[in-house]
Each structure stands twice: as structure tokens, then as C-alpha cells.
Image (cartoon, rainbow, N blue to C red):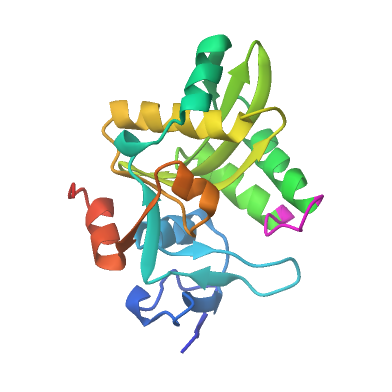
Amino acid sequence: MVFKLEENLIAFPDPTMADDDGLLAIGGDLSAERLILAYSNGIFPWYEEGDPIMWWCPHERFIIRPRSIHVSHSLAKYMKKHDVSAVYDRDFPDTMHRCRMKRENAEGTWITDDMEKAYAELNRRGFAMAVEAVVDGVIAGGLYGVKIGNNFFGESMYSDHENGSKLALVLLARKLDALGFNMIDCQFHTDFLESMGGEYISYSGYMELIHGIIL
């Protein structure tokens, strides 16, 4: 059963009532308060321009534990060969827009104008962050996501140069590990994320991580 949300009521149904494909509810808005409540319960918006806002909560979750980020032999060699560093929140709206353009020009994107405004507001409030990899002085790629407690919820990434998104993810994971973060939420499985150390966990296990229980 898919629930209809009201714009003037910041609330969600029980996340475990999501459909088999993870769809939980439609409607509502993208206010910072609603987004923070959503991510705190493993719920995220994902929809296309012109559709109602669709809220998802998959029963099985795909995450990367920061301490378990996988760096391939070839990527390690690349990092030794080049001057690689990370920059955080250089220009959050620009990073998000770069992610949008890479996908929009390829297969389409869920990153709408409203989404860009909403996540920029989360960033201003300290609940979203962007990271970009700089290789030999040039921005190679980056990603952005939501940050709540000791958990990072990845949203999208882009790559302008070789290994750009991989490097951004590795550098982010190392920083988050040093800060004691529990996970990087990947939302959905991809072969790329699996190659970087991604793993499936149950929704209950996922919520334990959100609540600070280290598994």
C-alpha cells in the first residue's frame, strides 16, 4: 500500500510498510524538516520531473562501512602516482549541479530544480555535504549526500576525469572513518558500489547503525 502524504503534516507511515520495491509514500514536500525526518528513518525521495514526490524505503539496504572501503591495486597505484586530495563543500550547489548534468546528459536524472534547492538548504543547515577529489590541482569528480549523526547518505556522484568519483568516495570514506561514522548509505546496489566494498544489510540492522549501534 502506498500512502499519500499531506504537505502541512511532517510525518511518514511506518517504513516497514513500504511495497516490495521499496515505495512507501507519495506527496508531501521537500522541506528541510521533512527530509531530515525521512533520512533519520531510512526514507529518501526519488522521482522524475513532473511526477509527485515519491518516498522510498527498501527493505534490504546497501551500504559501505567507511572502514571497509575497497581500494583496488590499480587505484592505489594511481593515488601514489598523482597528487590527490579532497575538498569539502567547495560549492555545494555546484557539486550537486555537476552530478545532475552528468546524468541528465546521459540517461536522465531525478535531480530536479526543487531537489537542488532543498538539498542546498540542508547544506546550509549542516545536514548535507559535498566532497570532490582534486588530482594534480584539477577537480576530477565528486559526490554529495545527507549527513545525520554518524551516518552519511549518498545521493549522487560525478566524474570529469579518470577515477574522479572513485577517488571522491575513497577520500570521503577515510575521513568518515576517522570521524567514527557508521556507514555510507548507497540506497541501491550497483556493481560499482559493490566493487568499492558495498554490502547488503537488513532494514533493522540499518536502523541500528542510524541509532549508533556498531555492527
Residue drawn at x 40%, y 49% is 198
| Camera-side residue of 194 and 212 | 194
Q: Position of residue 126 (x, y in %)?
A: 45, 37
Relative to 39, residue 165 above or below: above
Instruction: Tell me, yes or no, whether the highlighted magenta stretch contains residue 106.
Output: yes
| Camera-side residue of 83 and 46 | 83
Residue drawn at x 42%, y 70% is 58
Relative to 197, residue 82 above or below: above
Q: Position of residue 7 (x, y in %)?
A: 55, 73
Instruction: Tell me, yes or no, whether the highlighted magenta stretch contains residue 159.
Output: no
Residue drawn at x 49%, y 47% is 193
| Camera-side residue of 121 and 52 | 52
Q: Position of residue 167 (x, y in %)?
A: 54, 28
Residue 23 shown left or right of residue 17 in the figure = right
Q: Main secondary structure of the magenta part?
A: loop
What segment is highlighted magenta in the picture?
Answer: 105-113
| Camera-side residue of 43 and 142 | 142
Relative to 63, residue 86 above or below: above
Q: Position of residue 13 (x, y in %)?
A: 38, 78
Q: Tell me if I can see residue 83 in this picture.
A: no
